[in-house]
Image (cartoon, rainbow, N blue to C red):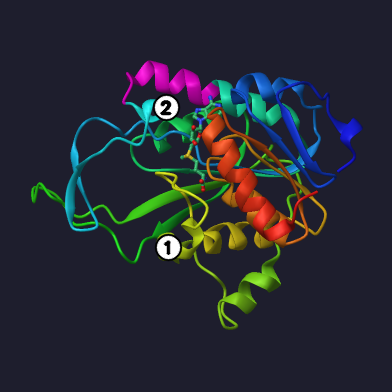
């Protein structure tokens, strides 16, 4: 990635010509980027599910608390937040680009509404079925065992890219469905530090292979521990990551350097 592609200021960590990390709030950072400049966006935003409830982790009962950024909010605030960052993403997405957004019932209906209001066209609503969900401690409802991933194109008219052949190959010669059974993050992907909502590389690899070509620019506005960046760079794509927490930017940097080398 040519560094004159974006305005550089003190918030940017330029790791190589293929990777730029921005330690800032995503709304501000997205405003620095040029319009219609990225091929694909993967966003794993706050789900706003940290509400003091209980869950189970490694056999122990724990409070659901992913961090300040994930605290439960009133519906209007969540809707406004989702509308604003998705609108900012739309500006930087190329006309034929696509966006993937993850969620659970806590945020995904709000995300879907914002996508409709902003003129996106939803291509799929993927169900990521987890093979190893924690038990439901209340015993008053079913065990939560999936997340949604909405895949949408910028407008009904745009001509998005889908690597159909690669997905059929990955699925042993059969069309791949919109239900993906993928385990949670294996421990060896956590070697460089902990992030409470890290996504597995297997999930990101599939998404990136399905919807981008080599050398494409992939943006993640909530990059967390940097899973999207690691996957993008390993698959010879270029990456722009935005993350507001300095500790997580450092974690992203360590993970990317481990696969990509110091530059
Ligand atoms: C769900 S996590 C992403 C995890 C990531 N997909 C991974 O695999 O590690 C969301 C991240 O967004 C960050 N975040 C929350 N609000 C933000 C904002 N307004 N701008 C930038 N980052 C934000 C949080 O600090 C958190 O690390």
The reply, left or right, for residue 5 in relation to residue 65 is right
Dot 1 lies on which element? helix
Q: Position of residue 87 (x, y in %)?
A: 62, 24
Query: Does residue 142 lie above or below 105 as drawn?
Result: below
Residues packed near mark 1 inside 10 Å, few (<14), some (14 to 19) or many (20 plus):
few
Mark 2 vs ligand 1: CB below 8 Å = yes
Residues packed near mark 2 inside 10 Å, few (<14), some (14 to 19) or many (20 plus):
some
The residue where tag 1 is placed is 187
Picture disc at residue 69: 2
Is residue 152 something one can see in this rendering?
no
Quarter occupied by residue 66 = top left
- Identify the residue at horizontal 31%, vertical 34% (top origin): 49
Depth order, front residue of 30/107: 30
- Identify the residue at horizontal 80%, vertical 59% (top origin): 214
Q: Position of residue 112 (x, y in %)?
A: 48, 35
Give how far apart the Cα atoms at labels 1 and 2 are: 24 Å
Is residue 218 something one can see in this rendering?
yes
The reply, left or right, for residue 101 in relation to residue 36 is left
Q: Which residues are magenta?
A: 72-83
- Identify the residue at horizontal 60%, vertical 63% (top origin): 206
Nearest to N terminus: mark 1 or mark 2: 2
Depth order, front residue of 112/246: 246
Dot 2 lies on which element? helix
The reply, left or right, for residue 113 in relation to residue 86 is left
């Amino acid at each position: 990635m040519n560094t004159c592609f974006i305005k550089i200021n003190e918030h940017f960590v330029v790791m190589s010509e293929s990777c730029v990390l921005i330690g800032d709030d995503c709304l501000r950072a997205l405003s620095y980027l040029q319009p219609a400049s990225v091929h694909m966006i993967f966003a794993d935003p706050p789900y706003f599910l940290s509400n003091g409830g209980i869950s189970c982790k490694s056999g122990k009962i724990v409070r659901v608390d992913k961090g300040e950024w994930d605290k439960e909010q009133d519906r209007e605030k969540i809707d406004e937040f989702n509308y604003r960052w998705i609108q900012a993403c739309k500006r930087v997405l190329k006309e034929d680009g696509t966006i993937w957004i993850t969620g659970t019932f806590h945020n995904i209906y709000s995300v879907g509404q914002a996508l409709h209001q902003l003129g996106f066209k939803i291509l799929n609503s993927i169900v990521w079925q987890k093979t190893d969900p924690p038990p439901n401690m209340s015993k008053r409802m079913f065990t939560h065992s999936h997340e949604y991933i909405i895949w949408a194109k910028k407008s009904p008219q745009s001509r998005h890219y889908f690597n159909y052949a690669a997905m059929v190959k990955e699925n042993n010669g059969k069309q791949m469905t919109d239900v993906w059974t993928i385990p949670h993050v294996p421990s060896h992907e956590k070697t460089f530090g902990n992030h409470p909502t890290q996504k597995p590389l297997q999930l990101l690899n599939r998404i990136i292979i399905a919807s981008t070509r080599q050398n494409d620019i992939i943006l993640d506005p909530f990059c967390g521990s940097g899973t999207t960046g690691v996957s993008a760079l390993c698959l010879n794509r270029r990456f722009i990551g935005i993350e507001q927490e300095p500790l997580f930017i450092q974690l992203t940097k360590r993970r990317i350097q481990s696969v990509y080398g110091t530059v």
